[in-house]
Amino acid sequence: MKTFFVRAALILTVLFIAVISCKKNAVPKCDGTASTYNSNMQALINSKCTNPGCHPNYATFAGIKSVLDNGAFKNRVVSTKDMPQGGSLGTSDLNKVQCWIDAGYPEK
């Protein structure tokens, strides 16, 4: 009986790691959304990044501009996917972000 539980736990652990790995390795692709800060990125950033204690300065385009310009935003959100805190964005949101990146982070 003990062997069964050990094997089941091992299988569940391997499956959990596989699922997490697949999500982290997914490469965002622009889905054709015309993303600008004002049209759809501001709402996404405000809901995921400007929480108390995180990045309150990201509530405006001027506040987030420096991390856009130095590549930190793309690196943390799209490449390493360790932001926002608590997990990466879903595929749809990542694709919108990728469209915004591809367009050069337009504000309007």
Image (tube, grey):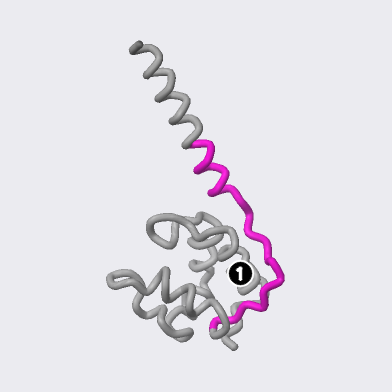
What residue sits right under mark 1 in the picture?
96
Q: Going by the picture, which residue comes out furthest to the front?
A: 1
Residue plotted at (71% across, 71% down): 32
Percent coordinates x, y for residue 48 in the rendering: 42, 68
Residue 5: x %, y % from top left: 37, 19
| Residue 94 picture quarter | bottom right
Stretch of the chain drawn in magenta: 17-37
> Can you tell which quarter of the image residue 55 is in?
bottom left
Where is residue 2 drawn, in percent x and y?
Answer: 33, 13
Q: Residues within 10 Å of mark 1 (few under 14, many from 20)?
A: many
- Residue displayed at 43% across by 62% down: 84
In the picture, the quarter occupied by the N terminus is top left
Look at 55% across and 81% down and name the residue there.
37
Q: Secondary structure at mark 1?
A: helix
Magenta-colored stretch includes residue 32? yes
Q: Which residue occupies the extreme left position in the image? A: 53
Most distant residue in the bottom direction:
108
Looking at the rendering, in which quadrant would you find the C terminus? bottom right
Say left or right for 55 vs 28: left
**Residue 92 lies in the magenta-colored region:** no
Give the residue displayed 59% in from the left and 78% down from the top.
Answer: 105
Please, what is the three-letter code of the amino acid marked with disc 1?
Lys
Q: In which quadrant of the rendered view does residue 3 lie?
A: top left
